[in-house]
Image (cartoon, rainbow, N blue to C red):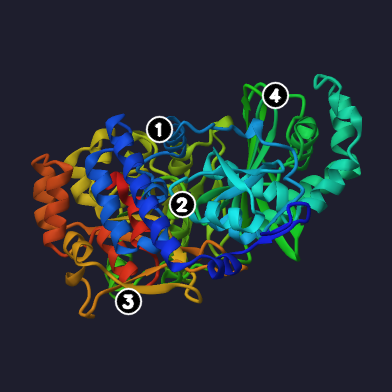
């Protein structure tokens, strides 16, 4: 046993060596039993569907080493973190702690391997002479409990927490950047607690060196971690900072709640916003140089119950590459897309939810079409990237320059190609259709879940069916999935049940059929790096035009497109899973709404 008075550092390798094979078998049996109890409890409470549980089981059987079934269900989004934590707490009669209840500092005599804690999403929060209290998201994972008991020689007591909040606590306790932010925070003046209605005081606070360094550190860390967005969110007793990395939000070390007014005022000053106006949303822009890069930060503020919430979208003009292969287009798919894109007139639509890469795809298409013999004009809100040789117009609805108003002026500028940032209303759609009928190529986006949905969406907006069939050439629907880090990705043989359910044998001639799972490294614990696109492309045909004129439903339109060779987004995702570009888990995560 270890001496409790001395710090004890438990690590995966040491613990693995200390645990006997018989004990491993016993632990696995306990984990499986507890997994099943939790799942049945969720089903009984109506928080989990039987069909979703069956799907989760099949994926878990395919790769049982990837973690418990409970954690898999949460990762797939079949059960929310909160629902899972509530159920586990109720079933096992264990305390469920909120982030407000977390201790300010970790227990002094338990020094943990941060990689081990992050891997298992556990964190020690208290200790006594006889026991250690461990905060866990998944009590079905018995290994970290056994490891801590072996390392400390003390009993381990469990408390339940949300996985995201535990990850944040680990960062707070052991994060490598803790000292940098801590040092800055120590230098913040106590004047922060004065009334937030004193605008001059807020302006002075936001101009102090510690606050400036604090905001710069938040932005710098976001760039270092490849974040696309920074979320600064005030709550009753804390200020939460989160980064969106590869499409997923991660909570990081945050400044103290007392600095909320100063931090948000500093961001608003940098974005040239009115710091006195806190009742209305505001939009602004920050141009800043970080690590030698010129960055464009688009800033949005909205008033909430506890102050202004700020989101900064990071645009790195130097990093973006407008290349179809980089986006995830295969040779065959690209040729099909270019055949439609290069038609002299008509409408090409790109559809998908917010943040699915539609704008990047349109910019890449414009770069392909941008030659000396054509004139291209765009109207966007906002203009995200500037392309040499293209006339780009920033829509300004506050002064009456919306998409439809700008389009009326654009058609008098003798363009060959027009790009509309978004087809938002019937008036914009009518002008786009009129432009296509008079010999222009029009590119735009729609917010729909799939390609066939683009047709029904335009009909719902009030576009006449005969006009739609006369002008729309093709509709590309897409999603972004996290790309596997090939240096640590691990291949494994797909289980027969998974092969049958997803018909994987129709997408590859390889035998046995292999899939891939994310590995882990000290520099990349998630096993993912960057994102790629999964997509489907509907090309308008005579058969599809007849269906549209007959007011066929979205399902019928999609079935006809598939008969004509369209591969769905889900199928494209399966192909990329087989190629080792992503995982089936990722594909299910972003296409789950497709059923």
Residue 148, position as x, y percentages in the image: 60, 54
Q: Write down the residue under mark 1.
A: 91
Upstream in the sequence, badge 1 or badge 2?
Answer: 1
- In front here: 324 or 410? 324
Residue 278 disc label: 4
SS state under label 2: loop
Query: Callout 3: 10 Å neighbours few (<14), some, many (20+)?
Result: few
- Marks 4/3: CA distance? 51 Å
Mark drawn on residue 494: none
Which residue: 62% across, 21% down? Answer: 305
Residue 83 x/y as whole percent: 42, 34
Instruction: Compare residues 170 and 405 and report the one nearer the observer.
Output: 170
- On screen, 410 above or below 525? above
Per the image, the residue denoted by label 2 is: 141
Check if mark 3's residue and mark 1's residue have beta carbons within 8 Å.
no
Place residue 64 in its image quadrant: bottom left
- The earlier-in-sequence mark between 4 and 3 is 4
Q: Residue at x 56, y 63 (%)?
A: 525
As helix, strand or loop, the secondary structure at mark 1 comes to helix
Whole-percent x, y for residue 344 in the image: 31, 63
Which residue appears farthest toward the bottom when viewing the image? 510
Along the line of sight, the residue nearer the viewer: 197 or 461: 197
**Labels 2 and 4 touching (C-beta < 8 A):** no
- The total of numbered circles placed on residues is 4
Q: Which mark is residue 331?
A: 3
Sequence-wise, the earlier of marks 4 and 1 is 1
Q: Nearer the viewer, residue 173 or 499?
A: 173
Quadrant of the rendered image containing residue 424: top left
* Residue ID at (44%, 35%): 92
């Amino acid at each position: 046993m270890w001496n409790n008075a001395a710090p004890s550092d438990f690590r995966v390798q040491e613990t693995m060596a200390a645990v006997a094979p018989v004990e491993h078998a016993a632990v696995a049996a306990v984990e499986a039993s507890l997994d099943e109890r939790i799942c049945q409890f969720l089903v009984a409470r109506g928080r989990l569907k039987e069909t979703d549980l069956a799907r989760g089981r099949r994926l878990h059987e395919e790769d049982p080493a990837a973690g418990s079934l409970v954690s898999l269900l949460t990762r797939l989004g079949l059960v929310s973190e909160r629902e899972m934590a509530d159920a586990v707490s109720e079933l096992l009669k264990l305390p469920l702690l909120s982030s407000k209840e977390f201790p300010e500092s970790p227990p002094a005599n338990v020094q943990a391997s941060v990689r081990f804690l992050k891997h298992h999403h556990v964190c020690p929060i208290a200790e006594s002479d006889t026991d250690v209290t461990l905060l866990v998201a998944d009590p079905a994972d018995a290994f970290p409990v056994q490891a801590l008991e072996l390392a400390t020689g003390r009993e381990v007591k469990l408390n339940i927490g949300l996985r995201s909040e535990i990850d944040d606590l680990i960062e707070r306790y052991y994060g490598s950047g803790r000292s940098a932010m801590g040092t800055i925070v120590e230098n913040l003046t106590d004047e922060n607690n004065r009334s937030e209605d004193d605008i001059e005081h807020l302006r002075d606070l936001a101009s102090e060196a510690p606050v400036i360094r604090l905001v710069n550190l938040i932005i710098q860390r976001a760039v270092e971690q490849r974040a696309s967005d920074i979320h600064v969110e005030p709550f009753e007793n804390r200020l939460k900072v989160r980064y969106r990395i590869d499409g997923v939000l991660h909570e990081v070390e945050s400044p103290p709640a007392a600095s909320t007014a100063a931090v948000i005022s500093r961001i608003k000053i940098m974005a040239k916003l009115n710091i006195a106006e806190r009742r209305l949303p505001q939009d602004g822009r920050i141009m800043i140089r970080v690590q030698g890069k010129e960055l464009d930060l688009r800033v949005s503020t909205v008033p909430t119950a506890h102050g202004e919430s700020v989101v900064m979208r990071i645009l790195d003009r130097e990093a973006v590459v407008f290349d179809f292969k980089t986006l995830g287009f295969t040779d065959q798919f690209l040729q099909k897309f270019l055949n439609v894109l290069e038609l002299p007139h008509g409408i090409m639509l790109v559809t998908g939810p917010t943040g699915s890469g539609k704008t990047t795809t349109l910019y890449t298409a414009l770069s392909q079409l941008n030659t000396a013999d054509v004139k291209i004009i765009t109207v966007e809100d906002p203009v995200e990237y500037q392309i040499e040789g293209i006339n780009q117009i920033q829509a300004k609805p506050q002064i009456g320059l919306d998409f439809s108003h700008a389009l009326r002026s654009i058609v008098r500028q003798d363009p060959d190609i027009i790009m509309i940032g978004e087809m938002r209303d019937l008036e914009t759609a009518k002008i786009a259709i009129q432009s296509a009928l008079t010999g222009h190529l029009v590119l735009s986006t729609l917010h729909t879940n799939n390609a066939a949905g683009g047709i029904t969406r335009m009909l719902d907006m009030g576009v006449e069916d005969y006009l739609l069939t006369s002008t729309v050439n093709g509709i590309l629907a897409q999603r972004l999935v996290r790309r596997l880090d090939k240096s640590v990705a691990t291949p494994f043989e797909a289980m027969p049940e998974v092969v049958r359910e997803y018909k994987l044998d129709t997408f590859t001639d390889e035998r046995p059929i292999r899939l891939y799972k994310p590995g882990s490294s000290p520099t990349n614990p998630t096993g993912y790096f960057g994102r790629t696109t999964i997509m489907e492309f509907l090309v308008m045909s005579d058969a599809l035009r007849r269906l549209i004129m007959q007011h066929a439903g979205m399902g019928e339109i999609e079935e006809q497109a598939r008969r004509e060779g369209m591969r769905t987004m889900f199928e494209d995702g399966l192909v990329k899973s087989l190629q080792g570009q992503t995982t089936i888990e990722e594909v299910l995560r972003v296409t789950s709404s497709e059923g």
